[in-house]
Structures are given as structure tokens and as C-alpha cells.
Image: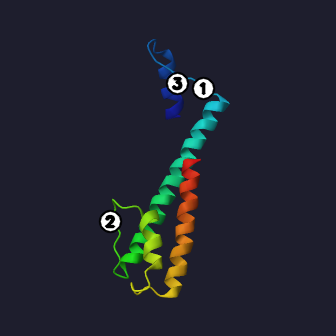
């Protein structure tokens, strides 16, 4: 009831501006932007998860450094104490991160 009253009030005001209805194409573009935001959020989350898992093994990747550039070296380093299970997990997580990055770019 309050919404209906507010709508009636707004319509009677002479200097009220109304938002134009979006076209189907505008809605589609906005959907693409929202989906991209989701990919960016998921990519950031994945990168932070990788950083957190590595930090549990004493390997720290600072926020200003790219995980994609550092992770191959970390996985190849046989003396950093990462067990095989962890290396395989990190490879899978890195593949997922690359896929998310590809989605963001496309």
C-alpha cells in the first residue's frame, strides 16, 4: 500500500524524472558485466586460497606478485618440502585459476 501511494505521489510531481526502460541489448550487456564481476571475484578467491594453502607450508607469495608466474617455480622446486599430494592439488587449483582468468578476459 505504501509503495502504491509513493508511486502516485511521484507521478503527480511535475519535475520528476523517470528512468527509461532498458532495451534487451542493454540488459544483455549488463548481464555480461555482472557475470564478469563474478569471474573476477572467483579468480581473486582462488588466488587467495592458493596463497593461504602455500603459507601453511611456509611459502609466501606477496599480494603484489602474480601467482601464475610464481607457482610453476614453486611446483618445480623439489626442496621446498611440498608433498606430492599438495603439488597435484596446486596444479589443479592453478589450472582452475587460469580458466577463471581466461573467462575474465573473454
Image vertical order of residue 99 relative to residue 74, above or below: above
Q: How crowded is mark 3: few (under 14 residues within 10 Å), some or many (20 or more)?
A: few
Residue 93 % position (x, y): 53, 70
* Towards the viewer: 22 or 69: 69
Rendering quarter of residue 92: bottom right
Image vertical order of residue 86 relative to residue 48, above or below: below
Look at the numbered disc 2 and give the secondary structure of its residue.
loop
Mark earlier in primary sequence (1, 2): 1
Left/right placement of residue 10 relative to residue 31 reads: left
Q: Which residue carries the number 1 mark?
A: 21
Left/right placement of residue 40 relative to residue 24 reads: left
Badge 2 vs badge 3, beta-carbon distance below 8 Å = no
Tell which residue pokes out farthest to the top in this image.
14
Mark earlier in primary sequence (2, 3): 3
Question: In 3D space, how far apart are the residues under numbered discs 2 and 3 (Cα atoms)?
Answer: 45 Å
Question: In 3D space, how far apart are the residues under numbered discs 1 and 3 (Cα atoms)?
Answer: 7 Å
Residue 51 % position (x, y): 40, 70
Question: In 3D space, how far apart are the residues under numbered discs 1 and 2 (Cα atoms)?
Answer: 46 Å
Residue 40 % position (x, y): 49, 53
Q: Which residue carries the number 2 mark?
A: 62
Which numbered circle lies on residue 105?
none
Q: Which residue carries the number 3 mark?
A: 19
Q: Residues within 10 Å of mark 1 (few under 14, many from 20)?
A: few
> For the point 51% across and 21% down, which residue is it?
18
* Towards the viewer: 16 or 75: 75
Rendering quarter of residue 64: bottom left
Look at the numbered disc 3 and give the secondary structure of its residue.
loop
Amino acid at each position: 500500500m505504501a509503495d502504491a501511494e509513493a508511486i502516485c505521489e511521484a507521478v503527480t510531481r511535475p519535475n520528476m524524472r523517470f528512468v527509461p526502460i532498458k532495451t534487451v541489448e542493454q540488459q544483455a550487456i549488463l548481464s555480461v558485466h555482472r557475470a564478469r564481476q563474478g569471474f573476477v571475484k572467483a579468480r581473486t578467491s582462488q588466488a587467495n586460497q592458493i596463497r593461504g594453502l602455500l603459507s601453511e607450508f611456509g611459502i609466501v607469495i606477496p599480494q603484489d606478485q602474480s601467482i601464475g608466474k610464481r607457482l610453476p617455480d614453486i611446483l618445480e622446486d623439489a626442496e621446498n618440502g611440498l608433498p606430492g599430494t599438495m603439488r597435484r592439488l596446486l596444479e589443479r587449483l592453478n589450472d582452475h585459476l587460469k580458466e577463471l582468468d581466461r573467462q575474465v578476459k573473454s
